[in-house]
Image (cartoon, grey):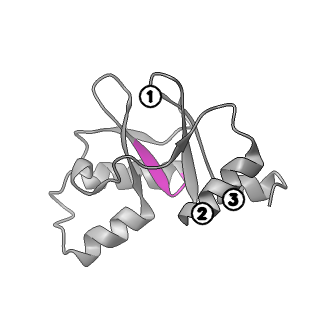
Amino acid sequence: GEAIPAVPVTATLGEALVEMTKKGLGMTAVLDGERRLAGIFTDGDLRRALDRNVDLRHARVADVMTRNGKTVTPDILAAEALRLMEENKINGLMVIDEHQAVVGAFNMHDLLRAGVV
């Protein structure tokens, strides 16, 4: 719940950045009206937005987020998550349940701390 970085799909880019910074995972889930995963906003999305000269003061997170980002289910093995991250050159994953609700999140640093890497 509280530890998972998340903003509504209506959030501004600034609100998403604050949430991402506060939670320290380098990403935030973007949730639809039913609190299901609509997208993921990452450091990479921010860099691409800057490269495209997006007006950061007025942009919505929905305009720059990654739709259909890689996700995993709670039963995934850590080694499998690591393989998925390496194959897709990503640093974090959202964990979703069968209803597309976000139930967790982790990044490469979490796997390092756990001794998986």
| Image height of 84 relative to 5, above or below | below
Q: How many marks?
A: 3
Q: Residue at x 18, y 61 (%)?
A: 57
The amino acid type, in three-letter code, at marker 3 is: His
- Mark 1 secondary-structure assignment: loop
Give the farthest residue toward the right: 115
Q: Secondary structure at mark 3?
A: helix
Q: Hey, which residue is sitting farthest bottom in the picture?
A: 51
Q: Residue at x 35, y 50 (%)?
A: 16
How crowded pointer 2 is (Cα within 10 Å; few <14, some 14-19, many 20+) is rated as few
Q: Secondary structure at mark 2?
A: helix
Amino acid type shown at disc 2: Glu
Residue 74, image quadrant: top right
Inspect the image, locate mark 1, and give the three-letter code of the amino acid beneath it: Gln
Residue 41, how many percent across, how many down?
A: 38, 53
Which residue range is magenta in the image? 24-29
C-alpha gap between disc 2 and disc 1: 23 Å
- Any part of residue 107 in sight: yes
Is 94 covered by the magenta stretch?
A: no
**Is 105 positioned to the left or the right of 77 in the image?**
left
What x and y, as percent, mark residue 113? 79, 55
Q: Quadrant of the C terminus?
A: bottom right
Residue under numbered circle 3: 109
- Tell which of 101 and 60 is nearer to you: 101
According to the picture, the residue beneath numbered tag 1 turns out to be 100
Query: Does residue 90 appear in this view?
Result: no
Residue depicted at 44% across the width and 47% down the height? 28
Q: In what quadrant of the picture does the N terminus appear?
A: top right
Point out the tag, 2 or 1, that comes first from the N-terminus: 2
Q: Residue 106's spot in the image, x, y percent?
A: 62, 47
Q: CA distance from mark 2 to mark 3?
A: 17 Å
Report which quarter residue 37 is drawn in.
top left
